[in-house]
């Protein structure tokens, strides 16, 4: 068995027309790991996944994916890497006029699967798609189309799976089915990178990184990311608390002010806690600190005011 990491990259950088999209990305990913890419819109998740998939050449950095050096032009090693990688794009990449089975057959042919007809049948079975085999893809619901996209990315039994928001727009049941697939594949040894906006999904990964402005600004377990964000969530209650909404929003380091039936909930940088404590004392308000969540951390980490570039140079 090959014990080398499936991905080992450092300092990956990509700019579009001189504007930086990803900077200094690093990752070492072993077989059986699930790595999550979190981040605000435009954080650099898709660009990172496309570089790892060999679809976009990085401007700078070092490293390899499945042994293929991303910085050395070697057609043969590139082909081997591409044939062992499953990539599911954020945008629908299926032929809508073809049926479900025809789309899978097309993918199997592209990847040079040795017995494409068998691969189509076993994939249809594995993904509960048999009843839809002859249905045109253009007539599938969004959830089934997404499921087919995942099935198509897996038809060649890849060692590495790169998934760009595979659960976007899915209902709870369909999301659970996708995560069941992801965890079973990882348990069987597939290495997986998955991007998501649904922060609750970070709990299902081995570890994650949060990208802001193209930089990794926090990494590790959900707990690690919350700790690195240095975030506090609290609630204020008391007579006339609603009168302070505007002034609370103006306090530096306060990233979320949410009116609630019994008071106001705040998400803030922990260093600014003293300002809120003073306001509560002056106005005879009660203050209660709650356990911060990944959503609270994301409010801080993903805020455009936090210039990730400046923090990382
Ligand atoms: P989202 O969560 O919204 O899908 P993302 O985290 O996947 O975003 P990217 O799509 O990688 O982020 O985009 C990172 C940055 O690069 C953004 O500022 C985006 O506008 C820019 N960008 C992405 N693709 C291109 C392109 N083809 N040409 C120019 N700029 C691009």
Image (cartoon, grey):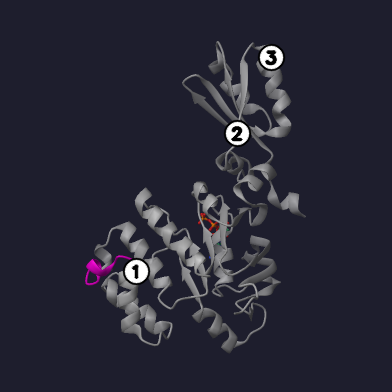
Q: CA distance from mark 1 to mark 2?
A: 40 Å
Q: Give whichever of discs 3 and 1 has the lower sequence position.
A: 1
Which stretch did the figure color magenta?
127-135
Task: Please tell me whether the stretch drawn in magenta is mainly helix, strand or loop.
Answer: loop
User: Disc 1 on helix, strand or loop?
Assistant: helix
Relative vertical location of residue 38 with respect to residue 272 in this rendering, above or below: below
Specify whether residue 62 is painted magenta.
no
Q: Is residue 71 depicted above or below 128 in this figure?
A: below
Residue 126: horizontal and vertical position, in percent? Answer: 34, 69
Q: Quadrant of the N terminus?
A: bottom right
Please indicate whether residue 112 sits to the left or right of residue 304 in the image: left
Q: Foreground: 50 or 225?
A: 225
Quadrant of the image occupied by residue 292: top right
- Residue at image point 75% right, 53% down: 312
| Secondary structure state at the residue bearing disc 2 | loop
Locate residue 25 relative to residue 106 in the image: left or right.
Answer: right
| Quarter of the render that holds ligand 1 | bottom right
Instruction: Quadrant for residue 64, please give it.
Output: bottom right
Q: Quadrant of the C terminus?
A: bottom right
- Above or below residue 131? Residue 120 is below
Vertical placement of 136 versus 245: above or below?
A: below
Q: Which residue is mark 1?
A: 126
Residue under numbered circle 3: 281
Image disc number at residue 291: 2
Name the residue nearer the viewer: 106 or 157: 157
How far apart are the alpha carbons under marks 3 and 2?
A: 22 Å
Q: Residues within 10 Å of mark 2 (few under 14, many from 20)?
A: few
Q: Hey, which quadrant is residue 26 in on the image?
A: bottom right
């Amino acid at each position: 068995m090959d014990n080398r990491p499936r991905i080992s990259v450092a300092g990956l950088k990509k700019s579009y027309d001189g504007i930086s999209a990803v900077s200094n990305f690093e990752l070492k990913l072993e077989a059986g790991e699930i790595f999550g890419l979190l981040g605000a819109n435009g954080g650099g998740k898709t660009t990172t996944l496309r570089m790892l998939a060999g679809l976009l050449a990085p401007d700078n950095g070092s490293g390899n994916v499945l042994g293929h050096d991303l910085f050395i032009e070697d057609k043969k090693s590139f082909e081997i890497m591409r044939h062992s990688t499953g990539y599911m794009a954020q945008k629908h990449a299926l032929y809508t006029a073809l049926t479900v089975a025809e789309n899978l057959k097309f993918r199997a042919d592209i990847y040079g699967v040795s017995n494409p007809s068998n691969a189509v049948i076993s994939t249809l079975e594995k993904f509960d798609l048999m009843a839809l085999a002859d249905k045109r893809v253009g007539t599938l619901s969004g959830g089934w189309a997404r499921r087919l996209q995942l099935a198509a990315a897996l038809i060649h039994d890849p060692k590495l799976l790169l998934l760009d928001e595979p659960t976007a727009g899915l209902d709870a049941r369909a999301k659970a089915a996708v995560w069941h697939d992801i965890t079973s594949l990882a348990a069987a040894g597939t290495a997986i990178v998955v991007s998501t906006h649904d922060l609750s999904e970070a709990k299902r990964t081995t570890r994650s990184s949060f990208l802001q402005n193209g930089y990794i600004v926090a990494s590790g377990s959900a707990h690690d990311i919350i700790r690195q964000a240095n975030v506090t969530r609290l609630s204020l209650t008391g007579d006339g608390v609603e009168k302070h909404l505007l002034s609370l929003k103006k306090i530096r380091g306060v990233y979320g002010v949410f009116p609630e039936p019994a008071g106001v909930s705040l998400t803030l940088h922990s260093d600014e806690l003293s300002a809120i404590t003073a306001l509560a004392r002056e106005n005879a308000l009660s203050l209660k600190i709650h356990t911060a969540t990944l959503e609270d951390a994301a409010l801080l980490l993903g805020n455009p005011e936090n210039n990730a570039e400046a923090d990382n140079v």
